[in-house]
Amino acid sequence: MPSEVISRLKRKHGTATYIWRDISSPLDVSPITQVYGLCFTRDKKVCILSIQRKNWFTRWNLPGGQPEEGETAEETLHREVAEEVDIEISNLKLLGCHEVHYPGSPKKRTEPYYQLRYFALIEKINPQTPDPDNGQIQERRFIDPEEFNDLVTWGPVSEYALIKA
């Protein structure tokens, strides 16, 4: 692993710093605010989705989201990919996490928080349905890994996650 992988991104409320952390278990970090998956088809395409949120700084992202009360990280990822991009996944492998420092966050977090990154194999691609969270059908794409860094613009930390996947 490189000595340190860091992304600094301008956000609406200031600059957020993302530091890659290799971890062996979700229990290694707290609080976990989001869980995302690098979900691959058998022919090595990566699933991404379009984000249609007001004031969002990027158009494309990985499927995933916030854990619900009592959910494990793996349960969160299974639920979120089913809701957002209508896929079924298996073979989950924890790749690591982003340690996020965002003092200007609307939630006024002064301590770092963590966003987990998993590898997953796509077992089934279902017809798309509205996301229960917002009632929208998210645009999904299955892209070659070479296209990933041009579309998912989280900088070096996401590039490193893709390499690890």
Image (cartoon, rainbow, N blue to C red):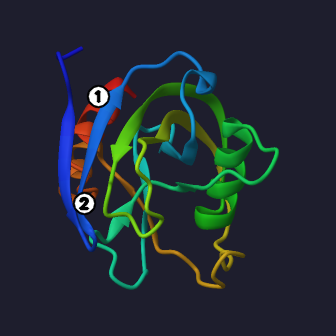
Choose top left, top right, bottom left or bottom right for residue 59. bottom left
- Vertical arrangement, residue 20 with respect to residue 60, above or below: above
Q: What residue is at 57 percent from the left and 40 percent from the top?
A: 31
- Vertical arrangement, residue 53 with respect to residue 116, above or below: below
Q: Amino acid at mark 2?
A: Leu
Q: Is residue 5 left or right of residue 31?
A: left
Q: What residue is at 58 percent from the left and 63 percent from the top?
A: 85
Choose the circle earlier in sequence order: 1 or 2: 2
Q: Is residue 140 left or right of residue 143?
A: right
Residues marked 1 and 2 touching at CB (< 8 Å):
no
Q: Amino acid at mark 1?
A: Ile
Q: Position of residue 45 (x, y in %)?
A: 40, 45
Choose top left, top right, bottom left or bottom right for residue 83. bottom right
* Mark 2, residue position: 151
Q: What residue is at 63 percent from the left and 24 percent from the top?
A: 27
Q: Quadrant of the N terminus?
A: top left
Q: Please, what secondary structure does the residue beneath circle 1 have?
A: helix
Identify the residue at the far right of this view.
Answer: 70
* Mark 1, residue position: 163
Q: Position of residue 35 (x, y in %)?
A: 55, 45
Q: Position of residue 80 (x, y in %)?
A: 65, 56
Q: Is residue 139 left or right of residue 87?
A: left
Observer-nearest of 124 and 158 = 158
Q: What residue is at 72 percent from the left and 76 percent from the top?
A: 132
Badge 2 crowding class, 10 Å Cα cut-off, few under 14, some 14 to 19, many 20 or more, is some
